[in-house]
Amino acid sequence: MLHLSPLIMILLFGLALNNPSLITRFRPFRNWVDERYPATLNEFKLFTGELTFAVRGFFFILLGYWTDLSMLNSPHAWITAGVVLLVIYTSRYAILQMARVDLADPLTWLAPRGLITVLLFIATKEAMNLPAYIDGAIMLVVLISSSLTAVGRVRWGKLSAAT
């Protein structure tokens, strides 16, 4: 009805749940929060964590099923994925440096990708006519960035454990 992405609606719902003062400002919702709210919110967070694991597992099974490996052979897909990854990591590093974050180096490798990338791509693909190699590029971005995240965790995890 509002022509908003369902992901934005979910984000707004999550913000309202975790920050009830955003909602209780309005008269109809003044009695929305009582003394049981923090306990209920904690239970909901635990439930959400378990559900998230299940959904991610199911999603990646479907992603593997839908992926045509021949799309990964395209040089255009590799070039596009390389450019996208370069933009993701350099912009993330620059933002972390400008914000003077102490852990900028390890946090650079934790740039979010995966489920949200694919969901946004599917929505874009329905709205626009994209070249076929983009499917392979998206899959390469997810696979390479996930691998870099794992490598970054191992590398920075050992350094933080040593200090």
Image: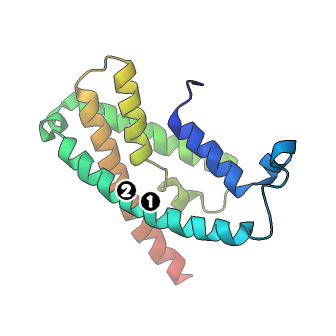
Give the x, y percent position of residue 51: 44, 62
Out of 3 and 147, give the one closest to the viewer: 3
Whole-percent x and y of residue 115?
40, 47
Frontmost residue, 40 versus 127: 40
Whole-percent x, y for residue 39 in the image: 69, 72
In the drawing, does residue 27 fall left or right of residue 22?
right
Residue drawn at x 39%, y 20% is 127
Identify the residue shown where x is 38% and y is 56%.
55
**Residue 110 to residue 115: above or below:** below
Residue 125 position in % (x across, y down): 34, 25
Residue wearing tag 1:
52
Q: Is residue 59 left or right of residue 162?
A: left
**How many badges with numbers are in the image?**
2
Q: Are marks 1 and 2 in contact (CB under 8 Å)?
A: yes
Residue under the point 74% across and 70% down: 36
Q: What's the residue type where badge 1 is placed?
A: Thr
Decide if residue 59 is on the left or right side of residue 106. left
- Badge 2 is on which residue? 56
Disc 2 residue type (three-letter): Arg
